[in-house]
Image: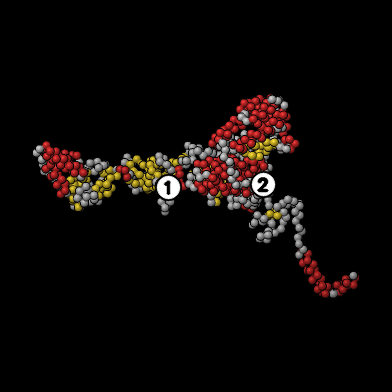
């Protein structure tokens, strides 16, 4: 070692020549070492962190690495998957930075109105416009109206016409009059007929009564006839001048009364549902600034202009002072009902600002502020109705008072897209398809009315019957109880129940136009929900039932329910009394037998044993003859009864109130079948 040290000291140049390359090599080796691996079990990344790709959010892996599609480094998926499928949670600071703004959903009442702004032009009232034609050939000798626009009164002379034909007609009248009293009675009758025919001929030439009276008394025929105005108004067109020759039927003048004028407006197709006869229209014209005129819609055209895609509507406008001139342009506002005619029976209609809508084709999504301290927003599909200026009617998906995002909704939707969750662009992102008949029993049991209604709809061609079945499906979806659902199922059902309400509403709207398309929309909605909920989507055919048998089941069920209520309350006395009341209307030996067993004892154990047999018998009869015909009828199953054998009972509400255990296990059970539901219109 000393020898090496002496060598470096004696020959420093040589030493540096050796040491510098070695030092450079070591430095390169040190800095080339890979950085220390991130410990995924500590720090910001939790052990259950999911890693995704910012460009391909459908990629999810349990550990960091590279995207198998684009080879980009994976990033932690923030926020996890808690909450509803379309919920986005952000901090108040982030909400302020994103400039998130909300606006309330407003209820729509039947008496509300809105203004539709349209443009149009003033025109002559065709009912007050006359065309004056020549009833005889001749020459215009004199014009009493020498310019267009002259105001005339009814009966005022317009022109004098020279015509040899009028001379001959008057001469025939005078001759017939003079010869009328000569000859035998038969000849006099013939000549009187000739005289009356001559008078009729002059009347057809529109000779005024005054002139006719003069002709009947004169002895000298005239070769001129005076043309008079048939109405008051203004001359809007003059087609002849003095000296003009005219033939029979040639037009001479057009006269229009401007005390009433028409306002012809052009209305677009999406505005037509609100327009009807009798609506008030206010308008202004540039020639009379500051003055507002009004009229009423008198006619709505039944044809659409194929190029402009507009329809004409006509407004009758009083114009006693003739301030408004035909040909003027007008800016009008139609005071229309906020609810289009034909939609008055639709309940719970609300409106949202147009800025809240995210639209892709027929689908529309809004983001709703979830009540709470921290800003949480939930995406929701809605069914849009007609547009009301700056707002839009929503027929399904929202309730009055909710807050919708009017600024920043697209940013929230982008966040869901990054998390590979259902969004505007991809409503099924992150959802897993499941085989049919794989749904939990408490959901599949409430799905049966939907399948039965679907089967009846598919077999029907009657629009009214199809409408009833679509309404039945909507009612069945709305009545599904989620009390026993697990959180994941609850979130999934919230998503698809909303979609079903929207799609079935769209099917109802399509039904009057195209029943086949309406059935297709409803069918696809059921199939889509079944695919992700693990529910069957094929219609479940109901065998023919006996209406009389269904009718007799209703009072039996109503009399059965007090027995179940008494047993759930651990009250054997009331159970016995209720069974006695049931016994009075029981009409089959088996029902009588089980009801009597309950009524003849005041001990809960034998009562509940007999109640199980009574329930099974009644459920069997409803399945045979009362499906969808006896009001609300749910089958609820408790798996603990009889040493885990389980037992069923009927309920008219989707709520578990266990009659087999009472207070000891009042909530034990789940809905396993829905035999019948009360139609929505009857509630």
Q: Residues within 10 Å of mark 1 (few under 14, many from 20)?
A: many
Marks 1, 2: nearer the viewer: 2
Q: Is residue 381 left or right of residue 279?
A: right
Which residue bears the numbered disc 2? 438
User: Where does residue 250 sit, x and y in percent of width and height?
Assistant: 24, 50
- Foreground of the two, 68 or 97: 68
* CA distance for labels 1 and 2: 52 Å
Quadrant where the image shows the C terminus: top right
Q: What residue appears at the point 48 percent right and 45 percent down from the top-left corner?
A: 512
Q: Quadrant of the N terminus?
A: bottom right
Mark found first going from the N terminus, 1 or 2 = 1
**Where residue 85 appears, x then y in whole percent?**
64, 47
Displayed quadrant of residue 102? top right
Any part of residue 332 in sight: yes
Counting every numbered tag in the picture gives 2
The one of 618 and 193 positioned closer to us in this rendering: 618
The residue located at (54%, 39%) in the rendering is 348
Residue in the foreground of this view, choosing between 25 and 365:
365
Q: Secondary structure under badge 1?
A: strand
Q: Secondary structure at mark 2?
A: loop
Q: Residue at x 70, y 26 (%)?
A: 572
Classify 10 Å Cα crowding around label 2: few (below 14), some (14-19), many (20 and above).
some
Q: Which mark is residue 267?
A: 1
- In this picture, residue 211 sits left or right of residue 634: left
Give yes or no for contact between labels 1 and 2 (Cβ–Cβ under 8 Å).
no
Report the residue that reaches farthest toward the right. 2
């Amino acid at each position: 070692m000393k020898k090496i040290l002496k060598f470096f000291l004696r020959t420093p140049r040589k030493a540096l020549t050796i040491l510098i390359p070695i030092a450079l090599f070591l430095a390169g080796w040190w800095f080339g070492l890979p950085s220390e691996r991130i410990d995924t079990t500590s720090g910001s990344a939790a052990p259950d962190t999911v890693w995704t790709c910012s460009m391909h959010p459908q990629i999810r892996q349990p550990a960091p690495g590279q995207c198998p599609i684009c080879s980009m480094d994976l990033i932690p998926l923030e926020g996890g998957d808690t909450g509803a499928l379309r919920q986005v949670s952000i901090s108040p600071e982030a909400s302020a930075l994103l400039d998130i703004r909300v606006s309330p959903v407003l209820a729509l009442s039947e008496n509300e109105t809105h203004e539709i702004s349209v443009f149009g032009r003033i025109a002559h009232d065709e009912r007050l416009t006359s065309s004056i034609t020549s009833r005889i050939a001749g020459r215009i000798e004199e014009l009493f109206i020498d310019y267009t626009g002259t105001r005339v009164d009814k009966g005022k002379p317009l022109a004098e016409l020279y015509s040899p034909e009028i001379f001959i007609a008057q001469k025939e009248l005078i001759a017939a009059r003079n010869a009328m009293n000569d000859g035998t009675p038969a000849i006099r009758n013939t000549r009187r007929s000739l005289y009356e025919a001559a008078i009729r001929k002059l009347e057809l030439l529109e000779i005024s009564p005054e002139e006719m009276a003069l002709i009947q008394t004169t002895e000298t025929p005239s070769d001129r006839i005076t043309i008079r105005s048939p109405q008051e108004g203004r001359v809007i067109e003059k087609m002849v001048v003095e000296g003009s020759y005219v033939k029979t039927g040639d037009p001479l003048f057009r006269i229009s009364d401007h005390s009433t004028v028409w306002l012809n407006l052009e209305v677009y197709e999406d505005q037509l549902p609100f327009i009807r006869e009798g609506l008030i229209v206010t308008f202004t014209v540039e020639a009379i600034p500051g003055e507002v005129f009004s009229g009423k819609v008198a006619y709505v055209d039944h044809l659409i202009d194929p190029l402009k895609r507009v329809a004409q509507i006509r407004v009758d406008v009083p114009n006693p002072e003739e301030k408004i001139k035909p040909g003027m342009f007008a800016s009008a506002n139609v005071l229309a009902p906020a609810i289009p005619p034909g939609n008055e029976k639709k309940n719970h209609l609300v409106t949202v600002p147009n800025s809240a809508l995210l639209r892709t084709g027929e689908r529309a999504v809004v983001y709703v502020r979830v009540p709470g301290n921290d800003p949480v927003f939930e995406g929701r599909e809605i069914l849009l109705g007609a547009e009301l200026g700056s707002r839009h009617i929503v027929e399904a998906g929202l309730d009055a008072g909710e807050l919708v995002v009017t600024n920043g909704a697209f940013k929230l939707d982008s966040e869901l897209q990054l998390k590979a969750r259902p969004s505007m662009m991809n409503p099924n992102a992150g959802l897993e398809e499941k085989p049919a008949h794989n749904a939990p029993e408490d959901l599949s049991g409430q799905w049966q009315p939907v399948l039965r209604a679907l089967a009846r709809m598919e077999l029907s061609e009657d629009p009214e019957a199809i409408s009833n079945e679509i309404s039945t499906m909507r009612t069945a979806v709305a009545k599904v109880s989620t009390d026993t659902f697990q959180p994941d199922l609850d979130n999934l059902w919230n998503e698809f129940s909303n979609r079903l309400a929207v799609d079935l509403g769209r099917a109802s709207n399509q039904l009057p136009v195209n029943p086949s398309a309406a059935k297709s929309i409803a069918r696809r909605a059921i199939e889509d929900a079944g695919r992700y909920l693990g529910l069957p989507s094929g219609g479940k055919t109901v065998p023919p039932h006996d209406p009389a048998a269904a009718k007799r089941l209703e009072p039996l069920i109503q009399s059965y329910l007090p027995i179940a209520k008494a047993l759930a309350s651990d009250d054997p006395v009331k159970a016995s009394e209720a069974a006695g009341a049931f016994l009075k209307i029981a009409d089959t030996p088996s029902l009588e037998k089980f009801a009597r067993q309950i009524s003849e004892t005041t001990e809960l154990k034998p009562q509940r044993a007999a109640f199980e047999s009574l329930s099974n018998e009644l459920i069997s009869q409803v399945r045979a003859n009362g499906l969808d015909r006896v009001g609300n009828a749910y089958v609820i199953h408790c798996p603990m009864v009889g040493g885990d054998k389980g037992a069923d009972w009927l309920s008219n509400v989707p709520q578990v109130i266990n009659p087999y255990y009472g207070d000891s296990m009042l909530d034990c059970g789940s809905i396993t079948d829905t035999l019948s539901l009360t139609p929505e219109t009857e509630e």
